[in-house]
Amino acid sequence: DIQMTQSPSTLSASVGDRVTITCRASQSISSWLAWYQQKPGKAPKLLIYKASNLESGVPSRFSGSGSGTEFTLTISSLQPDDFATYYCQQCNSYPLTFGGGTKVEIK
Amino acid sequence: EVQLLQSGGGLVQPGGSLRLSCAASGFTFSSYAMSWVRQAPGKGLEWVSGIFGSGGSPDYPDSVKGRFTISRDNTKNMLYLLMNSLRVEDTAVYYCSKDGAQWGQGTLVTVTS
């Protein structure tokens, strides 16, 4: 199974900050990576698919990059609505696997 | 509009069984792979099963393999998850998902004696 490692697990930031979250795969997954945002009590929301493609309706301050085993999610200017937990997921092969999550907190 | 409406779930004793259902609408159901994802209280997301549009090649992580069975009825636009031999550690909110882009509302499964 492919293991996904996210870092950091928690991130404290202020409104307007540039934020970067990293996800590493235990083996190459090409560009088969998705990023999700989740708020308490809600289903996850797809932000990025195939590593760098912005899902329809998602603000352009979110971007994704990477391929192979190293991926990043960047929020260019953190907004109040962005305080949440973020997960990566590899979609290369079954069983699909998620990273452990990154909680973005208010500094 | 894509909708995924979940039913089932609830309270069950260890060793018991439960079936979750997910009613899909607003898209050509048989053309899409579907997944079940769960989240234990205060924990992260865990993918627990997936199935291709044709119904073939279901897969599971080791944590549920041999106990959970995913299936679908493309004539009824329904996705199912049959959970047998439930354990306390299976307690979680369970979501059905299409492509990760659409999600059901989630349903709580609590395994307790």
Image: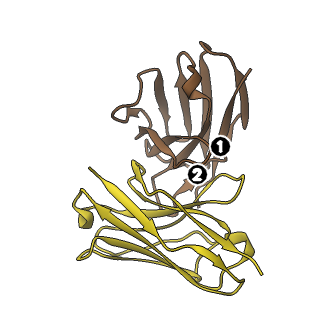
Chain colours: A brown, B yellow
Please report, as a chain letter, where disc 1 is located: A
Q: Above or below — where is B64 with respect to A76?
A: below
Q: Above or below — where is A87 with respect to A74?
A: below
Q: Above or below — where is B82 with respect to A67?
A: below
Q: Amino acid at mark 1?
A: Gly
Q: Nearer the viewer, residue B107 or B40?
A: B107
Rendered residue at 42%/32% (across/down):
A52
Say whether marks 2 and 1 touch (CB < 8 Å).
yes
Question: Measured from the top left, where is residue B83 in percent x and y?
Answer: 56, 80
Occupied quadrant, residue A97: bottom right
Crowd rating for badge 1 (residues with CA inside 10 Å; few <14, some 14–19, many 20+): many
Rendered residue at 40%/30% (across/down):
A58
Question: Measured from the top left, where is residue B108 in percent x and y?
Answer: 60, 65
* Mark 1 secondary-structure assignment: loop
Rendered residue at 32%/64% (across/down):
B24
Please report, as a chain letter, where disc 2 is located: A
How many numbered dots are placed on residues in this image? 2
Question: Measured from the top left, where is residue A103 in percent x and y?
Answer: 68, 36
B26 with respect to B66 (left or right): left
Q: Which residue is mark 1?
A: A101
Q: Which residue is mark 2?
A: A98
Distance (Cα) linking label 2 and label 1: 8 Å
Question: Measured from the top left, where is residue A78 in percent x and y?
Answer: 57, 19
B86 with respect to A31 (left or right): right
